[in-house]
Image: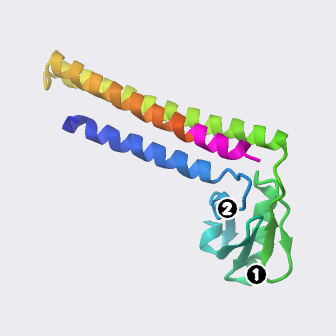
Amino acid sequence: MKEVNKEYDAKMRKTIDVIISDFASVRAGRANAAVLDKITVDYYGAPTPLNQVAAISSPDPRSLMIQPWDSTLLKAIEKAIQTSDLGINPQNDGRVIRLAFPQLTEERRKELSKQVKKYGENGKVAIRNIRRDAMEKFKAMEKKSEITEDDRKDYEKELQDLTDKRCKEIDALTAKKEAELMAV
C-alpha cells in the first residue's frame, strides 16, 4: 500500500471499529453489557457513561445487574434506562438495578435487523466519504504539480480497492449480526 493511502486506511478501520461497537449495543437473544454502552447518567451535572459509575454484571444469560458505586444514582440510572431505546423496564430494589431481557419477538428481531442494516449503511457511507475526501486531495495535489496524473490514478485505484474491501467487510459484519439476531 502506498504511504499516502495508509492514512485513509486507518480512518476506514476506525469507522469499522465504530460499527462493531454499534452492533454490540444492539441486543440479541442474550443479555450483553455492551447494550448499556450508549446510556449516560447525569452524575453531578455531567453526562457520564453508565459503565463509569456502576459495576455491570450478568448473573445469568437473560439478565444484567447494575450496582452503582454511589447509591444516590439509582434513580438517575433507572430514568436513563427507561428513556433509552432499550425497551426494558429496570427493577430497582434500593441497592441494585436488575434488567430482565425477555425473549425477542419476531417483530422486534426484524426491527433490530433494520437497525443493524442502517448502522451498516451509515458505515459504508462514512467509508465512501473518506474515499471522496481522499480523491479531492489527490486532485488538489495534481493541480499543484505535487504528483503526476499517473500517480493520482494509481492512488485512486488503490483507494477504490481499499474502499471495496472495507465495504465488503462491513457487509460481512452486518450479515453476521443479522444472523445472530434472527437465531431463535
Amino acid type, residue under disc 2 in the picture: Asn
- Is 176 contained in the magenta span? yes
Q: Which residue is mark 2?
A: 32
Image point (83%, 54%), residue name: 103
Q: Determine the image quadrant of residue 54.
A: bottom right
Depth check, front residue: 152 or 143: 152
Q: Determine the image quadrant of residue 140.
A: top left
Of badges 2 and 1, the one in the foreground is: 2
Q: Could you classify mark 2 by the number of other residues whose Cα lies within 10 Å: few (under 14), some (14-19), or many (20 or more)?
A: many
- Is 182 contained in the magenta span? yes
Q: Relative to 138, is 38 on the left or the right?
A: right
* Part of the protein shown in magenta: 174-184
Question: Which callout, 2 or 1, points at the residue further toward the start of the chain?
Answer: 2
Magenta span main SS: helix
Q: Quadrant of the N terminus?
A: top left
Q: Is 80 placed above or below 74 here?
A: above
Q: Which residue is mark 1?
A: 72
Image point (70%, 53%), residue name: 27
Residue at the farthest front position: 184
Q: Secondary structure at mark 1?
A: helix
Q: Relative to 173, is 166 on the left or the right?
A: left
Q: Relative to 140, is 119 on the left or the right?
A: right
Q: Position of residue 58 (x, y in %)?
A: 70, 71
Separation of residues labelled 2 and 1 (CA atoms): 25 Å
Q: Position of residue 79 (x, y in %)?
A: 80, 64
Q: Position of residue 178 (x, y in %)?
A: 66, 40
Depth check, front residue: 10 or 184: 184
Q: Secondary structure at mark 2?
A: loop
